[in-house]
Image: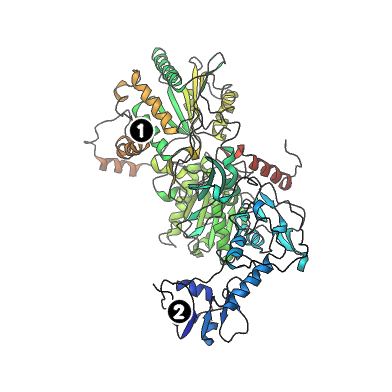
Amino acid sequence: MKPLKYFKINNIKFNYGLEFQSVHKSDYWKHNVPLIEYCETLGIIIPHYCYHKNLSISGNCRMCLIELKNSPKPVVSCAISAKACLNNGEVFTQSPLVKKARENILEFLILNHPLDCPICDQGGECDLQDQSFFFGISKKRFYNYKRVVTNKNLGPIVKTVMTRCIHCTRCVRFASEVAGVSELGMFGRGNQSEIGTYIKKTFQSELSGNIIDLCPVGALTSKPYSFLSRNWELKTVKSIDFTDGFALNTQVYLKNNKIVKIVSGFNSTTNSINWISDKTRFSFSGMFSPNRISQTYVVSGTKKKSLLQWKFLLNEIINTIYFQDHLNKHFFLMNKIIIIFDNNVSLEVLNLLLLFSKKYSFLKLRKLEGNLKLNDLETEFLTNTKTLDTSNLCLLLGVNTRYEGSHLNLKLRKRYLKGNFEILTLGSVTDLTFPVKYVGNNLKLLKSIVEGNNQLSQLFINAINPIIILSSEIFNRKDSNSIQKLLNFFKKQLRLYLPNWENLNVLNTSINEAGIHYLNKIKQINETDLKTSSGLYFVNTPTNLPLNLKKILDLKLLNFFNLNNALPKFCIEQNSGFSSNTLKKITPTYPLYNYFNLPDTVSFETTSSFINTEGILKKNVKFLPLTRQTKETWQIVRKIFLQSKEIFFIANVKDNFRVNFNTKTFSKYKNFLNFLYFTTVNLNTNQNNFEKINFLKIIKIKSKLKKTSEKLYLTKLKIWIQDFYLGGKDNYSKYSVTLIECSKLFRHEKDNFNYIF
């Protein structure tokens, strides 16, 4: 395609000296759309830097200046409509007048800006630096002293050098329009204008780190990242967020095989940049905390800690299991080995655990939390946010979207600002950064709405595509099955007025909680499992015991149930190295003979797959080398069961060798899961011949049976997370120094206590 001097559209000449892609007919001329948007539609590039809508480089930035014929001065293309150009015959984008005007604008922007690019953290990523190189002048006409502005304390995340500020007001607009926290603003007039907080307080928002990426100059930079490296020294890797259920795309920056910073990534589904939370941005430092233990060791019955290599440690584990198997035979017991995992476990590891629980009958899989019994349909445990634009009513049921899913909270705020959208909340009082109506916090109100005995029932009937969002933490209640059946009944009642209504959404708080529900229905650990177990095997569980297991141990301390203490117990813990407190917490109620520590990798040291709360498959690629004796999670499980082939177990001998597994590479391991999962997932110890069974008789019998009554506890729905920075379900945030400082500052300003002990 040859360069053109100008071209005509509807008899209007566009003087342009660069190549363009194509020219299409458009009805933009009929509307008062910005001229720059019309030119982008045609494939024409006008130099401008409004790369995010409504967040240009400056409120007074005029870098998209153009020249209109018969106009006495240059005009701004992003402020003039395409329809207004009909009266003019030509539009110039590279004329000498336009170039000179851009030079003057840049000279005005850097009037008080210090020339400290070599020591600025924004060097190499500065928009003002790029514009000065392409559109600026090489001479200066300002020889007076430049203005000096005192730095503001915005918290432990954002570092401020306010002398570099060009008053673009991006941070102010982001705080008020996106984050919903009006703590930043501009005060003063003329040469005394400054960006800061109106009172001496920090910028308290879970999204405060995004203003670091928004700032086009070095006025707002990352405080933990200060004076570490330059952009050209870093290597960029695409990854995902592991702190909540959405698993947003991120970009990880590496230097010398170490993570130095994490920024937001590109969302291919919405063609936009994700606003990530502060936990996503800074929790990586907790992965490599000094508290991490990356050595294999055994604590025997004599309470002596012995460091062992992997070969001897695996032999010790298998011998312990073999010893327990023979003791069960002598005592005429059928004790199980309980494998306990968290909702952060990957799909590959979960598949492997499911397969080997079918191989050995004495292995039982249990979840720590989330007793979801009805997971036959995807709508029972997924979040669908695509219907927000077509809805005018939303009910939040026991969920704090600001802390449990900041990405969903941003979408709700965006939909509210568009208008004609009412949000109701049934639960504790929270600040969601947008107005909501609190209707109560008791399930008795929900029961009356479903029965139709409440005024809100009429509101749902007359609403347009209403949405109900509940937290997955509700499934930790004893009456979670009753709540789910109650909501399903509400769904049937609404379908009488709203056909094909399917807007019952569950916000999952862990990265792979939805993936676990996809694969299988796994029970939650209870006191019966502890009674009939000879050992516990923890896989990727949090260091702080969850409420469910903690409650069971407390009941044992109160002698609510009796454990079989005749046999010695053992515990295998396979975590990312943060396992210092588990032994102390379990031993008083669950006497251990042997404790094995198996250090595995963190999220960025292994390749894994997850299914987020929206049902989208997310993949994380390994890009960090292993540290010391750590191994990947699936490799540890593979080695344990490979070692078990050498020993003959007595319990259920017939079924213990149905499934075999021996692959050393990750690609073969993935193929194994794909081929053998569906053939073995339905195996059990009581496989009978079902060919002669008449299923029609079974259906008739079930239809005659009475439906069982469900008990609903009319108690309050409480908020489970009080501290956003340290109170999530990920395993690393609580060890991050930056997030610990944020938590202290948050509690100091938001709570009634001045000091946190």
> Could you say whether the residue bearing mark 2 is in a helix, strand or loop?
loop
What amino acid is found at the position of numbered circle 1 in the picture? Answer: Leu
- Residue 181 shown left or right of residue 24 in the figure: right
Mark 1 packing: few (<14 Cα in 10 Å), some, or many (20+)? many
- Residue 644 shown left or right of residue 111 in the figure: left
**Of the residues under marks 2 and 1, which one precedes in the sequence?**
2
The percent position of residue 704, horizontal first and vertical second, equals: 34, 43
Circle count: 2
Against 40, residue 748 (above or below) is above
Distance of label 2 from label 1 (alpha carbons)? 59 Å
Q: Is residue 405 visible?
A: no
Residue 355's mark? 1
**Residue 366, image quadrant:** top left
Colouring:
rainbow
Q: Which residue is at the front of the view, 189 or 6?
A: 6
Q: Which residue is mark 2?
A: 27
The percent position of residue 53, horizontal first and vertical second, equals: 56, 66
Image quadrant where one finds the C terminus: top right
**Residue 285, image quadrant:** top right
What amino acid is found at the position of numbered circle 2 in the picture? Answer: Asp
Query: Residue placed at 40% from the left, 25% from the top?
Result: 640
